[in-house]
Amino acid sequence: MTTKLKATLASALIATTAMTTAAMAEDCTTKVGVLHSLSGSMAISETTLKDAMLMLVDEQNEKGGLLGCKLEAVVVDPASDWPLFAEKARELLTVHDVDVIFGNWTSVSRKSVLPVIEELNGLLFYPVQYEGEESSKNVFYTGAAPNQQAIPATDYFLDELGVEKFALLGTDYVYPRTTNNILESYLEGKGIAAEDIFVNYTPFGHSDWSKIVADVVALGADGKKVGVISTINGDANIGFYKELAAAGVSADDIPVVAFSVGEEELSGLDTSNLVGHLAAWNYFQSAESELNDEFIAAWKAKMGEERVTNDPMEAHFIGFNMWVNAATAAGTTDVDAVRTAMYGQEYPNLTGGTAVMGANHHLAKPVLIGEIQADGQFDIISQTTEVPGDAWTDFLPESAVLMSDWKDLGCGMYNTETETCVQLKSNY
Amino acid sequence: MVRFLTAAFILMAAFAAPSMAQDTIQEVLQEHRAVIEKSSRKTIAPAIDAIANSGLPSAQTVLQKWQSKEMWQRKEDGLFFYAEEVDSKTYSLFDFQDGAALGEAAKSDLKQLKPNSGIRAMIGAALVQFQLNDPDPVRRSEAILAIQRDGEASHLAPLRASIAGESDPDIKALKEVTERLLTISYDTDDAARVAAIQGFNGALSLDARAALNPVLTTKIALKDALPDDANIKDRVIAGSDALPFEDALAMIVDAGLIPAQPTVDERKDALLANITDGQVGGVAVADLDTQEARDRAYMALVADGKVPAWDANYSIEEAVKSTAFVEVYAEPSKAVTDAATKTIKTIDRAVGLNQTMDLALDGLSLASIYFLAAIGLAITFGVMGVINMAHGEFIMMGAYTGYVVQQIIPDYTVSIIVAIPAAFMVTFAAGVAMERLIIRWLYNRPLETLLASFGVAIALQQIAKNIFGTQARPLTSPAWLDGALVFNDVLAISYIRIAIFVLAGVFLAVFLFIMKKTRLGLETRAVTQNPRMAASMGINPDRVNMLTFGLGSGIAGIAGVAIGLYAKVTSEMGADYIVQSFMTVVVGGVGNIWGTLLGALGIGFLQKGIEWLNPSNTLAAQTYMIVFIIIFIQFRPKGIIALKGRAAGD
């Protein structure tokens, strides 16, 4: 009796296993979550990234997928609603069982997703330049940290343009406020007096810029050269640049460097009056390399001739390919194995050179500064070698002592003075 | 072989350069090749100077081509040329010396030199000497602009020399003003400087202020350390805001007048460093728990000569009291600083006056934008009492109509003229459809109307996203609306805002005409006051409601074209204006167009006023404004102009 039961059980088990194996060989899929807003106020920027991810997944499937399995993109729409980002991330990880998530744009949405990703041990690739002061075990930051965008751009203002008075204009949320705090402290360290730094915050979608532009112009009354550092986000930029052009502010008199304005944002503008104003990114569509030409051609073939490429797209391009290579090297898409394989991963930048993933989950990338041209593209006038991203800025006293090293120290918030790990979760 | 020869040539040029005068511009360029390639403002100056002062006829060409990013370098041999694009992959090269064509080269073999705007300004300053007397008036204007941006003492003489021969009266006037600005900063003759300064009495130009303010830069110094003829502005009292005690003390110590006194922390460190056998200066470490004990220990160390001296009775106030501090001008001539002070006083008065006027203009402009956005709502909500949350989306539809028209008609002027009636028709039709399909079933049920129209708003936004994408679309104003009406460097308003102001005025007139002089207006007023009575007088209330709603929506569509011209066209633009529009109508008083006008003016000026008080946070300004409006509504719930009697409807 017992023997019979055992035999039945065994055969049933074998049968099940055989069936599962057969099924996997036939059509196994690896799921890739795409968490970008397709509606609401951030859709203007994030929809493009969703399209870019779908293109990358398609291309990878044409190359034969990953580890012999087909990749499948699971797209959800968090609708620019920050708490909904957390819900949708949970849905991706628990309902759809995705192996990796590519997503988020605003820092506030990333902060909303963090607890979920860390609780469920997910893996998130975040493609946008951000304010730093964060390092999560479960997030790879493929966009620029402040030392890869804001600080070099400010140095450029100080050294190359001779700016002596700064107007820091930003949208009122966490990224501009943190970035401007870092910049204020950095500028004061460079000997710029506090009264020579003018700071202004405006709401999302602000459109009445006449007074602010007039205030900025009036800063030049004491004979010092004025420069504007803009962390204005989203469609408020359009009104700002229109007012700037109407006021006849020439880039030679008052240069503006923007951290959130790229090719995509300029495509909604007549740029003939903005020629010479600046943007700082790690990528511009006008970068000259064969890889970039291929990428642009593939994008235009998929999306239409008038579409442009931009920096966060390059970040996804690098992030996705690094993830594919790391999973291939690890032989599995298991989160912990992939994460370990990520450290030191190299992949060519679209601008030439090689991006390297550091142990602090940030990329080493070159910093580019471009001047706006009449055709809405950027003329790259300055390009550095690769700069490793720094999670904790050196220019705020409380974070200067912190460092992140997930590879050897296994800690994202390590105090180098007390030599202790402050905390592992990123619930700060 | 060719390569070898070129290399030899470069070597030769490089070695020959310092010893003998160079006779081709290429040699000059090659000598400074490294810094030109590096292209940094900090190191480029010698290269620009060498080219400008080479005395070679082609120097001007090189600088001009370099400035306009037309200078290229051949990667193979590092020689510089200027190039013209043949097609995207090939460029034809020209020699600087004689302009001879050197054939074509592939772009991949060339490197474009891209001077940044800092370097371009330096090149511009170097070009001044060539361009001031250039036959081309554009070049001459550029030269003057370069002086205004980056003036230097060496520009003064050539600029003065060029004024007499200037034929163009506009450029001559510009040169004269620039000459006075340069005189203030760089002339050595005080009388000439004073005269130039006085010439700017009451002047509003930013350049004049930028030249005058640096004349008055001061620093604080010790009176005794200054020479007798120093140009002193005023005495400064230590301990005042301008000179805190710590700074005063630091100055005296730096001047070596008194020895530095160790601070509390320094004394503590000194104690720590001198612990021997558990004791410091004869006091046990365990007893050092009071400041008094620590001071005693320190004095003992002083007596032993182990640490710097310290005066226990010392006070900063005492130390600085006996020293005289003064604020002294960097500018040595008193006549110049006096003249500048006087002139700046007159300028400040004029600037203050003009800033007030500018603020008033900004307020007026914002008010006209709010009014334009709200006037359609004044009809649908104010007259008919329908809470239409999709009003903002009608604005958005109007703006997209303008965009579509611009895609069909490329001439911006014509397209705007076509777009305005087109936007009216599209949104009128949409308004009528919405009234027929939804609103008319919900009259007298405000909550349901609100929810239903909110649903319509979301649907319209998503439809717009599906059709036009999520990216902002350009709605470009005609060239004659570009730029601003500039009264002076302080007072200016962009033409597009003036156009919106005019449009708002026109709509006010149209609204008044329709309501007071047409049959539709009469019927509308009759239906809103008493639909049953109106119906019994032979008016069809259904038809009147439909047309009125369509009219309000149509006006929103035209407002959309205007707002799209000055701000942006996105699917969410309507949402930005819906709250402001309702606020305008409610504050002004429901049902009265003059109330809407007053409401728009009140909100516009209030917002600008608060922004002026708190310039660093526009968001806070809006928050304060909403708080203010809530308080206002508490005291005048019916708005500025409250309807009385039967017209009030209740």
Image (spheres, rainbow, N blue to C red):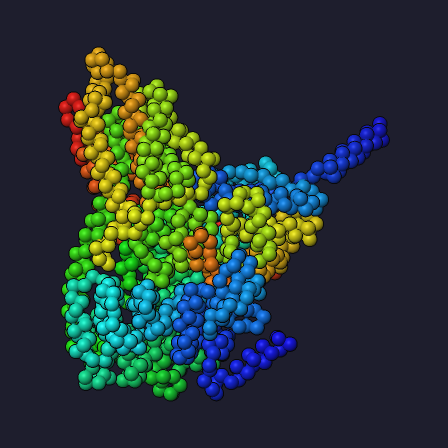
Image position, residue A299 (x, y; %) = 56, 46
B344 is higher (above) or lower (below) than B593: below
| Residue A59 seen in this snapshot | yes
B298 or A142, nearer to the observer: A142
Image position, residue B287 (x, y; %) = 39, 74
In terms of image quadrants, where is residue B56? bottom left
Q: In the rendered image, which quarter contains the N terminus of chain B?
A: bottom right
Does A300 sit left or right of A71 as displayed?
left
| Residue B637 seen in this snapshot | no
Q: In the rendered image, which quarter contains the C terminus of chain B?
A: top left
Farthest-out residue, top: B536
Q: Residue at x 21, y 52 (%)?
A: B358
Q: Residue at x 43, y 67 (%)?
A: B65
A228 is higher (above) or lower (below) than A191: above
Does A269 sit left or right of A65 as displayed?
left
Image position, residue B368 (x, y; %) = 24, 41
A230 or B12, nearer to the observer: B12
Q: Residue at x 42, y 74 (%)?
A: B58
A65 is higher (above) or lower (below) than B273: above
Image position, residue B438 (x, y; %) = 37, 22
Q: Residue at x 81, y 30 (%)?
A: A8
In terms of image quadrants, where is residue B554? top left
A375 or A256, nearer to the observer: A375
A155 or A225, nearer to the observer: A225
Does B323 sit left or right of B273 as displayed?
left
A38 is higher (above) or lower (below) than B49: above
Label tally:
0
Does B592 sit left or right of B300 as displayed?
left
